Amino acid sequence: MKIAGYEIIPLRVGDFKLDGGAMFGVVPKPLWEKQCPADSKNRIEMTARVLLLKMQGRYILVDAGIGDKDDARFREIFDITFPHGSVVDELARHNVTPEQITHVIYTHLHFDHAGGTTVLRDGEAIPLFPNAKHFVQSVQYQHGLTRNPRDRASYIDPNYEPVRVAGLLEFLDEDTELMPGLFLETTSGHTPALQMLRITDGKRTLFFPADLIPLAAHVPLPYIMGYDLFPLTTLNDKEFWLERAARDNWVIVLEHDPHIEAITVRQDEKGRIVIDKFGSITELAGSLYEL
Ligand SMILES: [Zn+2]
């Protein structure tokens, strides 16, 4: 599927589980458990769905999942598995090697997004993509350094410090059109300066909101993660971006939904934003746009 010259390929680079209560904040379990059944430890299924973009010799990776550096205890807490293989396996399926990756975009530095950008060699974490510039918002990086007791567990140095030390980390200071038609848009409800991705040729748009809308179940406005540092900012930003997406027929790709790759949304008769269609990126884009 191509938009604005970018071939857009979703990759599943690991599954995991998170506490269902934490994933839905103030929303009571009876309202979310049918859509997201919890296991005996109250965890719900999550995936790490990242994007590979190919464009004129550039290979751009948007997030890289959890990676496989973690010890047994960590893997058990989050039930981390790789039913589709690692990020290296998934890239290989599309004939791309880690060395060929030219750009990595970190939506943010939480372990389930940044972990896959480094690997262990002789017990030491090193960059997996040695030829790639890695982009993060500087406000997000600085926030990670504060080691705030509330979210410090999400920032694990070996996931991205080796990238910085190798001179591969580039800091951005605002919303930006990183390449023609590829926009990075920041939102600061989940964490300061998370960058979302919007690829557009003016008529057709693909939106990757990362943790602004992690699962299809998070489309209704009050469904906001307990993890979010500033939930009212999430609420405002969800309203703003979902209204645009409904008005202009965007395809929204969900980073963490294990069952639904992408959705489109519409406004219902009461003015609420609801899911219109769901399916693969290709199916939805094919139904909306002439490809
Ligand atoms: Zn996440």
Image (tube, grey):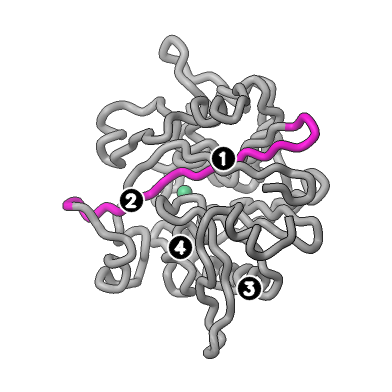
Of labels 2 and 4, earlier in sequence is 2
**Magenta residues, dominant SS class:** strand
> Quick check: 117 left or right of 132?
left
Locate residue 243 relative to residue 11 in the image: left or right.
right
Q: Earlier in the sequence, mark 2 or mark 3?
A: 2
Judge whether residue 48 is colored magenta. Answer: yes
Say whether marks 4 and 1 touch (CB < 8 Å): no
141 lies above or below 276: above
Crowding near the residue tagged with mark 2, few <14, some 14–19, many ≥20 C-alpha atoms within 10 Å: many
> Relative to 232, is 79 above or below?
above
Residue 162 vs residue 34, the one in the foreground:
34
Where are the magenta residues, as a range?
A: 40-58
Pinpoint residue 84: horizontal percent, then vertical percent: 42, 34
Q: Is residue 156 visible?
A: yes
The quarter in which the C terminus is drawn is bottom right
Q: What's the amino acid at mark 4?
A: Ala
Query: Which x, y percent locates residue 131?
Result: 69, 21
Q: Residue at label 1?
A: 63
Q: CA distance from mark 3 to mark 4?
A: 15 Å
Marks 3/1: CA–CA distance? 25 Å
Secondary structure found at label 1: loop
Left or right of 148, for residue 287: right
Residue under circle 3? 246
Whole-Å distance between the Cαs marked 2 and 4? 12 Å
The amino acid type, in three-letter code, at marker 3 is Ala
**Classed neighbour count for the residue bearing mark 1: other residues with Cα under 10 Å, few (<14), some (14–19), many (≥20):** many
Query: Can you say whether 88 is above or below 150 in the image?
Result: above
The tag on residue 45 is 2
